[in-house]
Image (cartoon, grey):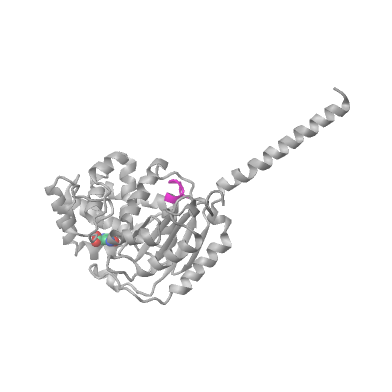
């Protein structure tokens, strides 16, 4: 080989290496950075727009069947987006701790999946929407599974009864610690909410006894209701709630701590549960208008998940007839539309026009 030939060969190798590096670099890079992060300014602007647009909305009213919730200042309003690469965008009353209420049901279902596997959770609880109010007695009687799904009260109390432990305290602490890991911060009980709800939860006790009649509760019924009442009384602020959602969006890895707190393979099941029943008898309308798995609580919070991208959480205590925060629904719908996030939209998966266009 002449010197010239050797030099030419070196150049070819150098070009090949450079091209390989360049063509691989962007894909390796884009795996680490979520599409939300790539449009940081846009997310920030959209969250601000939504916040300003719905800030003075006064429709709906606080839950009043739990006395504590009736007294919460209905003007409180907070919005947070946490991305899978741990960026946070937040506005408003972001330090206020509200009770997580029914949003807890998602995370107890996730813990049950961790402990028992998804098949057992499906057999023992189910995943059919009830089309009834979240605390419906009729749904328990009418549904073939009786439990319905993990996100209505009956199914949620039965899901709580699946969590193992030597005694009630051990079960409760396990649930609370798990929520904390999902949030990436220690969480605690709001004692006043717990006391207020425990004094007025005859309806949930009745549901638990009805489940016992059908053999669809898996521990002592009243003990399970008590643990369930505690889990609903856990305090979160809107950023912590968005991070809990972002952990699911991030395949079960908490974006702040980097810890795999939910098994990756459980995530699609958790999202399917949220899609079917996250907003109770408002879930069909929500799927139609927004198309993101979400969960509401009568405390006024809603968290919605854009898989692989992040989560948005909104807190506003005024609720609609189904028990879902009105402001939170409006803000999430606005943000999701502007950012093109919808589980049923090909654009959400990167197809901006039809193939061939
Ligand atoms: N703790 C509330 C209850 O059991 C939760 C209901 C909700 O948030 N929809 O009634």
Q: Position of residue 209 (x, y in %)?
A: 13, 52
* Residue depicted at x 25% and y 52%: 156
Q: Quadrant of ligand 1?
A: bottom left
Q: Which residues are magenta?
A: 248-254
Would you say 286 lies left or right of 4 here? left
Q: Quadrant of residue 193?
A: bottom left
Q: Residue furthest front?
A: 356
Q: Is 169 drawn above or below residue 323 in the view shown?
A: above
Q: Position of residue 222 (x, y in %)?
A: 17, 53
Q: Position of residue 201 (x, y in %)?
A: 19, 61
Name the image quarter holding the N terminus: top right
* Residue depicted at x 41% and y 70%: 77
Q: Is residue 252 magenta?
A: yes
Would you say 2 lies left or right of 82 here? right
Visible residue check, residue 164: no
Q: Is residue 34 magenta?
A: no
Q: Position of residue 257 (x, y in %)?
A: 48, 49
Q: Is 16 drawn above or below residue 191 in the view shown?
A: above
Dominant SS type (magenta): loop
Q: Nearer the viewer, residue 20 or 41?
A: 20
* Residue depicted at x 35% and y 74%: 74
Q: Quadrant of residue 75?
A: bottom left
* Residue depicted at x 18% and y 55%: 139
Q: Is 129 drawn above or below residue 45 in the view shown?
A: above
Q: Quadrant of residue 333?
A: bottom left
Visible residue check, residue 61: yes
Q: Nearer the viewer, residue 127 or 83?
A: 127
């Amino acid at each position: 080989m002449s010197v010239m030939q050797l030099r030419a060969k070196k150049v070819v190798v150098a070009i090949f290496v450079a091209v390989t590096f360049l063509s691989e670099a962007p894909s390796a890079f884009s795996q680490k950075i979520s599409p939300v992060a790539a449009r940081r300014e846009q997310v920030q602007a959209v969250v601000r727009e939504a916040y300003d647009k719905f800030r003075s909305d006064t429709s709906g009213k606080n839950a009043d069947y739990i006395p504590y919730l009736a007294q919460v200042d209905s003007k409180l309003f907070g919005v947070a987006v946490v991305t899978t690469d741990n960026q946070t965008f937040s506005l408003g009353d972001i330090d206020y701790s509200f009770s997580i209420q029914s949003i807890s049901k998602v995370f107890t279902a996730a813990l049950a999946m961790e402990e028992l596997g998804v098949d057992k959770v499906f057999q023992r609880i189910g995943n059919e929407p009830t089309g009834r109010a979240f605390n419906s007695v009729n749904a328990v009687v009418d549904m073939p599974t009786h439990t319905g799904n993990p996100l209505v009260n009956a199914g949620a109390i039965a899901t709580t009864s699946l969590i193992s432990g030597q005694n009630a305290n051990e079960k409760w602490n396990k649930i609370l610690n798990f929520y904390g890991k999902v949030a990436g911060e220690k969480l605690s009980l709001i004692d006043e909410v717990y006391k207020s709800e425990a004094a007025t939860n005859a309806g949930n006790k009745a549901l638990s006894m009805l489940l016992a009649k059908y053999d669809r509760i898996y521990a002592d019924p009243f003990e399970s209701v008590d643990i369930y009442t505690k889990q609903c009384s856990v305090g979160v602020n809107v950023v912590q709630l968005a991070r809990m959602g972002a952990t699911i969006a991030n395949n079960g890895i908490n974006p702040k701590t980097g810890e795999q707190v939910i098994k990756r393979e459980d995530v699609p099941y958790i999202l399917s549960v949220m899609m079917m029943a996250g907003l109770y008898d408002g879930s069909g309308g929500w799927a139609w208008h927004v198309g993101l798995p979400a969960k509401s609580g009568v405390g006024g919070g809603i968290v919605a998940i854009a898989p692989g991208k992040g989560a948005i959480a909104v807190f506003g205590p005024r609720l609609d007839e189904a028990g879902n925060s009105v402001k939170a629904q409006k803000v999430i719908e606005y943000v999701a539309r502007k950012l093109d996030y919808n589980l049923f939209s090909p654009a959400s998966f990167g197809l901006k026009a039809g193939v061939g266009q």
